Amino acid sequence: MSAAFVLAQLLNGLQLGLMLFLLAAGLTLIFGIMGLVNLAHGSFYMIGAFVAATLQAWTGHFALALAGGVGAAIILGIAVESALLRPLYRRGHLDQVLVTFGLILFFNEATRLLWGSGGLSMQPPAVLASEIQLLPGLPYPSYRLAISGVGCLVVVLLSLLLGRTRIGMLIRAGARDHAMVSALGVNIKLVYSLVFGLGAMLAGLAGVMTGPIIAVEVGMGEAILIQTFVVVVLGGIGSVKGSFVAALAVGLADSLGRAFLPLLLGGFLAPTTVSAVAPAAASTVIYLLMAATLLWRPQGLLGHRR
Amino acid sequence: MAALLEVRGLCKTFGALAVNQSVDLTVEANQIHALIGPNGAGKTTFLAQLAGDIRPDAGTILFDGTDITGLPAHRRAHLGIARSYQVARLFPDSTVHDNVALAVQACSRWARSVGRAAAGIGELNEPVAALLERVELAHRSRIPAGILAHGERRKLELAMALASRPRLLLLDEPLAGMGVEESQATVALLDRLRRDAAILLVEHDVQAVFALADRMSVLVFGKVLASGDPPTVRRNPEVQRAYLATSGEVPPC
Amino acid sequence: MIPRRLVVIGLIFAVLAAVPLYGADYYTGLATKIMIFGLAALGLDALVGIGGMISFGHAAFFGIGAYVAGLFGKSGIDEGLIVWPTAIAVAALFGAVIGSLSLRTRGAAFIMITLAFAQMLFFIAASLPALGTSDGIGLPHRNSLAGHSLGRAVDFHYVVLLLLAGALALTDFLARTPFGRAVDGIRQNEPRMGALGYNPTIYQLACFIFGAAVTGLAGALVANLSLFAAPDNLHWMTSGTLLVIVILGGVGSLFGSVLGAAVLIVLEEVLAEVTDHWMMILGPVLIAVVLFGGNGLAGFLLRRPHGRTS
Ligand SMILES: Nc1ncnc2c1ncn2[C@@H]1O[C@H](COP(=O)(O)OP(=O)(O)OP(=O)(O)O)[C@@H](O)[C@H]1O
Ligand SMILES: [Mg+2]
């Protein structure tokens, strides 16, 4: 096993972690501020990817696709929030879960109706289509690096927004302690739309960015949503910083688990057994990480206890 | 003899608000210890920490010599601490009888209670009736707790707290909302309870406090201003000043 | 006078018992499916409606029951008296592990964690060759009961009917015991129950395990109905479906689960006739029911709900 291979896996993990963070940040803020458990958060991720893939197929421009995909996610997010979800904030979790589950059913089927069930594919922009030589003997897709770059940029912008601006600090305080929400000021509805729009935007952005390296298909939203839940719980509900740490941990654990578990198991199992067991074992890594964290810190890494 | 309850240096802050600042307090067995103080002084928060509903930031709580600071609420209940709430916390849809039954049943081990099943519910009737008799609610036992009058809820809270035969009762304004007669009857009941349990009594009704308390402490802005036997505390100039400054009331001398 | 609730339950079971007498095998199969999903949702209703624990991963136990039946089928054991209790026991065991981890938290985190653990089991089932990967495991034929074949749809139907009735009676009974009342009290006000001396986690865990066991039995039965144990049984969509059945039927009503299953399954059949994209209709219908529907069908039939969510 070469150092180059390890480095490549670390980069893959970083990239997955950053994308998970984009979803988790929105989800955790929405729960923190509005008290809403939003199962349909993955739908914004899916819509972003579908709209972007379509725009790219029409125009051939990645930048246009990016803007369109993110824009569609924002518009959909704000529309859903103000039309449907607002009355849910004061209701119990059960109602929230069921309504947002209903939304998933609707969005998934509507997507199937509009785009068919075959799924779409997206290409990276031409300038990033090649591989670059990171180290001697380590070619790495430059687009994957670009994803991580965009992810890092968002992390910086988000931390400036939440740490340096007045509204951002209020939002962060409100997310950590629900009682603080009343201190957010008179125009609470605007804050709700803002936070939800921000969350949808980040999810849409993640969808567009991930589009070229995965299959754009119905159900992609829920696959990543469940991983995002692991991140949110691991980081501590309501804590953006916690989500960041947890997202990187989950991203790395997943990538490294998939790469190294077969090698590890190969140490004491027959090759046929390894190829039978390894995929199952690799997909459980992040859930075991979650279970261990629950035993050790039920409130999550940076969550706080009553 | 060691005190039944000994609290040392209890601290609790909510955000920037220091609600309890290094509170020391001891309650002797079979005594009524009154805890008074103006609104927002941190009395309810203090009781909640003793009962285990809120975790203190610092300090220790000793009950009968053992450190219970980190114990969950139900373990403290098993040790003999019971609590009534300032805002009555009942099960509004259940009847008065069923509310008390729930409290009585808590004292039996849970595994047995599964097996006892439906017949077991009848078994609870006797102790429930006795408790309701004690707080003079027997005539209301079949109505839902949610429609009780204010003072009656207080009595029901008290009955539920008594169900476990506690050694220490934490009572948060048990007389609030009661009429004169109800209030007198409850004071008499508390007076009798002294034989079975120690009571930490948070109460604004000054007359009742002075009628009942063996010792008292005054909490102002989260700090204990004075502690001792009632006449001494009453004469304490700091206490008088604090009361004048914050609420305008003077403890009657 | 007989309580209205018992009358309604009696009517439901009378209808279910009458289906094979008047309907074709297709309708009998449909009714059996309704009962099995009703049973699965009954286990979830014990959690949600009585215990106040919102699990979005309850399909885990449905799938576990199905796979137990599938694995037995593969190894040639088809006696229901062996297969079904084993399914119950294995589901309960998994319930104990998943429940005790998930109950380290409450509220929103609990929802997410139960979903995550179910997803983990889904991935395992979908990738382990021993479990047939994404193809699942086929059953050669239906389980027998004490040596009697249940190959005829009618026989299987009545066995499921009896199991459902038994499970419903047992759940109802337990809900009225001191234990059930304590669980119900914890749902209403957990800190209060703690102060009274109850250890909320232990009661909730017991309730969780019970719900898992009931749904595990339903899983073994569904594998018998379709002669198949598939990863789909563990899929989050199935978890969502079970929750939908519970809310359609009326949270905490227990018997409502059967009604909810009937409505959902019949609606599915009817809508699927009309359009391939019937989920586009189901989604908004579900949203409308949650927002404006009161306490489900049971609430509508009884007008005095037995339990409610906080
Ligand atoms: N969970 C909480 N979060 C934030 N602040 C709180 C919380 N609970 C209480 N407080 C604040 O702590 C202070 C003390 O409250 P507490 O209820 O202990 O006072 P108290 O002495 O019981 O008053 P009262 O006589 O009115 O019952 C109050 O200012 C209250 O607003
Ligand atoms: Mg108070």
Image (cartoon, rainbow, N blue to C red):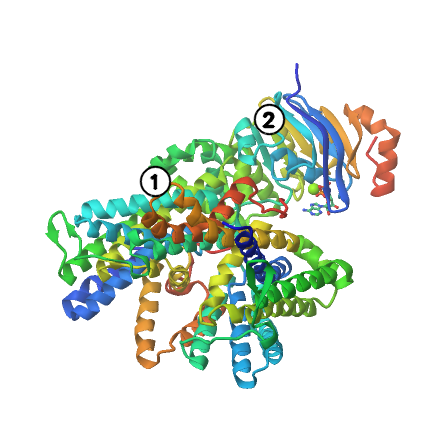
Q: Position of residue C214 (x, y in %)?
A: 32, 50
Q: Residues within 10 Å of mark 2 (few under 14, many from 20)?
A: some
**Residue at screen point 47% across, 67% down:** A220
Q: Chain of mark 2?
A: B
Q: Secondary structure at mark 1?
A: helix
Is B214 above or below relative to C88?
above
Taking depth in this image into account, of A88 and C110 the one nearest to the observer is C110
Q: Nearer the viewer, mark 2 or mark 1?
A: 1
Is A215 above or below relative to C141?
below
Asked if marks 2 and 1 touch (Cβ < 8 Å), the reply is: no
Ligand 2 neighbours mark 1 (CB distance < 8 Å)? no
User: Quick check: do tags 2 and 1 share a chain?
Assistant: yes
**Residue at screen point 36% across, 48% down:** A274
Figure quarter occupied by ligand 2 = top right
Label 2 to label 1: alpha-carbon separation: 32 Å
In the rendered image, the residue lying farthest to the front is A136
- Residue receiving disc 2: B193
**Left or right: B242 as drawn, with respect to C178:** right
What number of labels is visible? 2
**Left or right: C272 as drawn, with respect to C76:** right
Picture quadrant of residue A105: bottom left
In what quadrant of the picture does the C terminus of chain A appear? top right
Is C245 above or below relative to C69?
below
- Residue receiving disc 1: B118
Is C63 above or below relative to B11?
below
Taking depth in this image into account, of C188 and C233 the one nearest to the observer is C233
Picture quadrant of residue C260: bottom left
Q: Position of residue B135 (x, y in %)?
A: 55, 35
Q: Position of residue A67 (x, y in %)?
A: 62, 77
The residue type indicated by label 1 comes to Ala
